[in-house]
Image: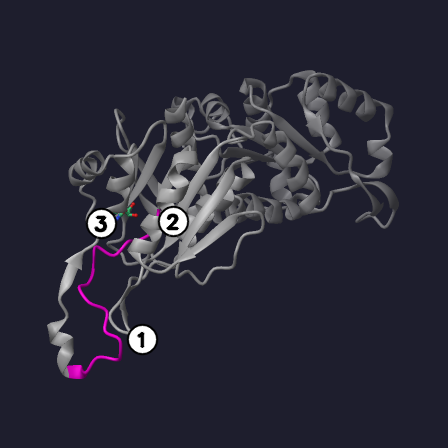
């Protein structure tokens, strides 16, 4: 999804360490990145396209002369915010340093202006060869981030420097490459998560199915991007996130109260909690009788989002709408009526959103065409929403 800053091309060179890149791909996706794999033809001897397609959920090609009408190397290069080449062989680095473009991956690299992380893995003799050393120096001088391989035992049985680094070390390096864009640094982000409970009596309540996963994903993503995050969590069983101030509430009223005291110091408010629209008029002191169930009178809850929108100064407000139909017009009207700047229309028609790891729907933003979000992780959506909020915040 262009413009949202989370698109990665994973270039795979023809070395045995290609299989370790499968793990890297999975972790990148866990961190909310969309990954397109571009293997070199020789790397397919180690890991085939089917594996990459299954793990990335995307089509994989190695050929420049496939789908020529799409000018694939240019469109891939434009779409990518980051390129990771793992593993990079001595030959692949030599080709990049020489400016060759003899397969799809090297074409994409030449056509791209995005930050590129190179993770070499090869036999120590090849790593220490003068030609490889010169190529690495050239690449570094041109701004490529080239990691040093680990030292240890190699597949050949030899010991030395040339091992593919542990995934955690690659991710650390990658986050410093990405982290140059800690774009929420100094911003205050307030997130609501979970679902409110409206007491009927001491043991019963009106509640909903919200797990809090989406709100927690937003809080975590904002924190990763440098924001100062406060999370208002309603009845979620998820574990607290280290470094995030979390206020626990139960009812819509408690949520409103907590938000009112936080809102003025906030830059971005994300209302991902499912708030009950109504509550029992009276809360019984003791457990009500079966016969009283049909006599519970309800009273409307305040619309929290709308209330806060009326108090806003510079804040950007993101709302959520869980709908069983994809009616974009109704959602657009809801966004305006509530005073939200951005609204995520969560398509729950398949019943697969609550407590699920994935989501799909539409991002609506004022003055823009709705943007379809195909099935993706809640982390990815979190980053997409934060990107949009930042754009609007200017
Ligand atoms: O009207 P609807 O419930 O579909 O709106 C959903 C959005 O409004 C969510 O962002 C939710 O957090 C917020 N909301 C609210 N107060 C309510 C009901 C919903 O802030 N009483």
In primary-sequence order, the first of circles 2 and 1 is 1
Q: How many numbered badges does the structure rendering display?
A: 3
* CA distance separating discs 2 and 3: 14 Å
Residue closer to the observer: 78 or 361: 361
Is residue 85 visible to us here?
no
* CA distance separating discs 2 and 1: 24 Å
Q: Is residue 133 left or right of residue 193?
A: right
* CA distance separating discs 3 and 1: 23 Å
Judging by the rendered image, the residue that carries numbered circle 2 is 258
User: Is 59 contained in the magenta span?
Assistant: no
Whether disc 3's CB lies below 8 Å from ligand 1 is answered yes
Mark closer to the observer (2, 1): 2
Residue 27 % position (x, y): 57, 47
What kind of secondary structure does the magenta stretch mostly adopt? loop
The secondary element bearing badge 3 is classed as: loop
Is residue 197 visible to us here?
yes
The residue under the point 82% across, 32% down is 127
Read off the magenta span: 272-290
Task: Return the mark for residue 19.
Answer: none
In primary-sequence order, the first of circles 3 and 1 is 1
Image quadrant assignment for residue 42: top right
Do tag 2 and tag 3 residues touch (Cβ < 8 Å)?
A: no
Residue 80, compared with residue 289, is above or below; it is above
Task: Return the mark for residue 302.
Answer: 3
Judging by the rendered image, the residue that carries numbered circle 1 is 203
Residue 161, compared with residue 366, is above or below; it is below
The secondary element bearing badge 1 is classed as: loop
């Amino acid at each position: 999804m262009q413009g949202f800053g989370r698109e990665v091309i994973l270039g795979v060179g023809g070395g045995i360490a290609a299989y370790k890149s499968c793990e890297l791909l999975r972790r990148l996706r866990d961190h909310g990145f969309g990954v397109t794999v571009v293997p070199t033809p020789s790397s397919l001897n180690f890991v085939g396209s089917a594996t990459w397609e299954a793990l990335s959920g995307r089509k994989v090609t190695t050929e420049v002369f496939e789908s020529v009408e799409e000018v694939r190397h240019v469109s891939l290069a434009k779409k990518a915010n980051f390129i990771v080449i793992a593993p990079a062989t001595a030959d692949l680095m030599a080709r990049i340093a020489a400016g060759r473009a003899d397969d799809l991956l090297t074409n994409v690299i030449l056509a791209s202006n995005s930050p590129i992380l190179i993770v070499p893995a090869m036999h120590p003799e090849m790593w220490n060869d003068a030609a490889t050393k010169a190529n690495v120096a050239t690449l570094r001088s041109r701004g490529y981030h080239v990691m040093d391989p680990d030292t240890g035992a190699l597949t050949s049985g030899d010991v030395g420097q040339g091992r593919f680094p542990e995934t955690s070390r690659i991710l650390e390096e990658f986050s410093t490459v990405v982290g140059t864009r800690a774009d929420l640094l100094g911003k205050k982000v307030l997130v609501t998560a979970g679902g409110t409970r409206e007491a009927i009596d001491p043991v019963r309540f009106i509640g909903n199915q919200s797990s809090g996963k989406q709100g927690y994903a937003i809080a975590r993503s904002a924190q990763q991007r440098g924001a100062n995050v406060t999370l208002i969590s309603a009845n979620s069983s998820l574990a607290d996130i280290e470094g995030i101030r979390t206020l626990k509430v139960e009812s819509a009223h408690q949520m409103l109260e907590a938000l009112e005291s936080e809102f003025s110091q906030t830059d971005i408010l994300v209302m991902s909690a499912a708030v009950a629209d109504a509550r029992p008029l009276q809360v019984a002191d003791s457990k009500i009788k079966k016969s009283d169930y049909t006599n519970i009178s309800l009273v409307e809850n305040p619309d929290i989002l709308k209330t806060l929108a009326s108090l806003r100064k510079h804040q950007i407000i993101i709302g959520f709408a869980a709908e069983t139909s994809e009616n974009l017009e109704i959602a657009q009207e809801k966004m305006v009526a509530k005073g939200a700047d951005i609204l995520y229309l969560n398509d729950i028609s398949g019943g697969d959103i609550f407590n699920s790891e994935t989501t799909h729907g539409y991002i609506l933003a004022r003055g823009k065409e709705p943007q379809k979000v195909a099935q993706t992780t809640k982390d990815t959506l979190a980053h997409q929403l934060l990107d949009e909020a930042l754009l609007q915040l200017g």
